[in-house]
Image (cartoon, rainbow, N blue to C red):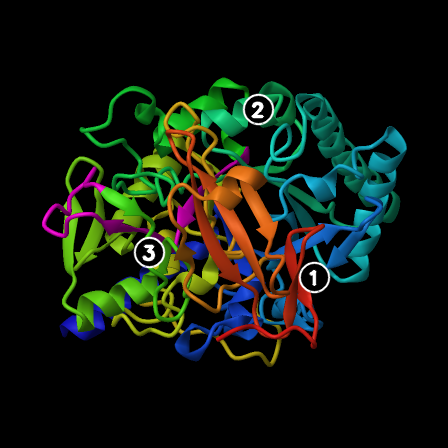
Amino acid sequence: MGSGVLTVALLLVGFACLAQGSKKLFCYYSSDAQYRTGPGKFLPENIDPTLCTHVIFAFFQPTDDGLGVKSVTPEGLYEKTVALKQKNRNLKVLLAIGGWLIGSKPFLPVIKSQHSISTFARNVVKFLRAHGMDGMDMDWEFPGVRGSTPADKPKFTMLLQKIQDEFKKEAARTGRDKLILTLATAAGSYYITEGYEPTEIVKHPDYLLLMTYNYHGAWENVTGHHSTVWTSGKDTGPRLELSMQWTVDYWLSQGASRDKLILGLATYGMTFTLKNPSRNGILAPAYGGGRGAQYTNEYGIMAYYEVCENLAKHGWTKVWISDQQAPYAYGGDQWVGYDDPKSLKIKVETMINGYRLAGAFVWSVEMDDFRGRCGGGVYPLLKAIIQSMDGGIATPVQRPGQPTFPPALPTQPSPPPPRVTPRPNVFFPGRQGFTSPRPNFVTTTVPQVAAFPSTSCTTLGEGIHKDPNTCSQFFYCVRGVEGSFAQFTMACPPKTAFDGNYLVCVYDSNCYTPA
């Protein structure tokens, strides 16, 4: 048998196991990716609905009065995401509410009283059913901090309980499948301790989506891989907590059941700017995050397909970290820790199969190589995850008349504890808009680092602040270990303005975005 035929045959066997699959693969989709240009532009139709058991659309927000849910994305995006179920009847589409960028402020009206909590929960049910969605991902990052107080921790527990209660009541009343409740769950001890009643919150969500990435990043002055099973042999003290193994062990110790735990995997790399390009290993001195990459153009992060391009076309060097079983790459003064199919296979086999967890989620689907530019076919990271999970994932069910997909060819973060870097701000790719989201915005200019320390940040304090001189820009103030600040200037996408109340970019055709 020829090698090509053998490869295809093995892949067919591998994907045949999906028929018996029981693992889950949640795929976050950051709607901000619509603003990217060239091969980075990503729309719902770019999602392969056969590769995910669940797609999570990020992000929506609570309404201003805290009693309902509102969209901050252009019309049509979430409808097109829901329409993916026409190609796979087993697919579930969830709505993520929150994100790193908006912090706690929009959630405070939600937990103002028992009445507001109950009303919000009932209206969430109505909204999800009205729009054909299958559940909600609670993405408040995080209770107890960032504008919230410790008194809000039990209110957050109550909120999760009430939403789940309403989901169960509606299912019992209507006979429909119960809506799914997931929680984007902190992975580091600081936000866990400050934000949650751990032994209580594990009782209410159907799944805990552990944000086991962004253990290291732009807020630090030395390099480090952001998402590893084990810490580096060079790590000491509190840094020994910054690993997937620590996070999973912690949540199990708090009573979380294994069949609720979903391991977070990153399709992006975290970047650094090296102080000395000749010192380019782990714990190499760095100024902070790397410059925005060609297509994502986001400070401190780089999509997997951008890493591939740097390796293939720009002479970057790839290095394998033997004690952490993950790669990094460097070129000039730029450094990135990332995952490839090999390292993801190790993570899945060690943490998901080894710990018998319920599955994985990726942040985020649009930062995998969705166009097949790396030479390993489309979505090589997602496919590596699927092939490595015991039993694969549930079989996609095609609607009659839909084309079938060929066999695959072989993918708030939890910020580090303050004991490492006091109250670090984590840049969630899409998750806070500048990764994501981790309502989020996409920068259209490379963030510029102001003089350190920054007088304006010293006055304004840590966090995100509106630029008083232009409608389209805002400042991100990051506190360093010594208490001084770094200031990053960021821009909203074209035809949007920065809303200083809700800390998001909103549509405004009269707002000009500087080039």
Q: Earlier in the sequence, mark 2 or mark 3?
A: 2
**Residue carrying label 1:** 72
For residue 114, above or below residue 427: above
At a point 19% along the width and 65% down the height, the residue shown is: 311
Extent of the magenta region = 260-285
Q: Position of residue 266 (x, y in %)?
A: 39, 50
Q: Earlier in the sequence, mark 3 or mark 1?
A: 1
Q: Position of residue 490 (x, y in %)?
A: 50, 59
Q: Position of residue 244 (x, y in %)?
A: 37, 34
Residue 98 shown left or right of residue 158 in the figure = left
Label 1, label 2: how far apart the Cα atoms are? 28 Å
Q: How many marks?
A: 3
Q: Quadrant of the N terminus?
A: bottom left
Of the two numbered discs 3 and 1 in the rendering, the one whose residue sits closer to the viewer: 1
For mark 3, does the 10 Å Cα neighbourhood hold few (<14), some (14 to 19), or many (20 or more) residues? many
Is residue 34 visible to us here?
yes
For mark 1, does the 10 Å Cα neighbourhood hold few (<14), some (14 to 19), or many (20 or more) residues? some
Dot 1 lies on which element? loop
Q: Nearer the viewer, residue 514 or 146?
A: 514
Q: Earlier in the sequence, mark 1 or mark 2?
A: 1
Residue 269 on the magenta span: yes
For residue 441, above or below residue 97: below
At a point 53% along the width and 26% down the height, the residue shown is: 192
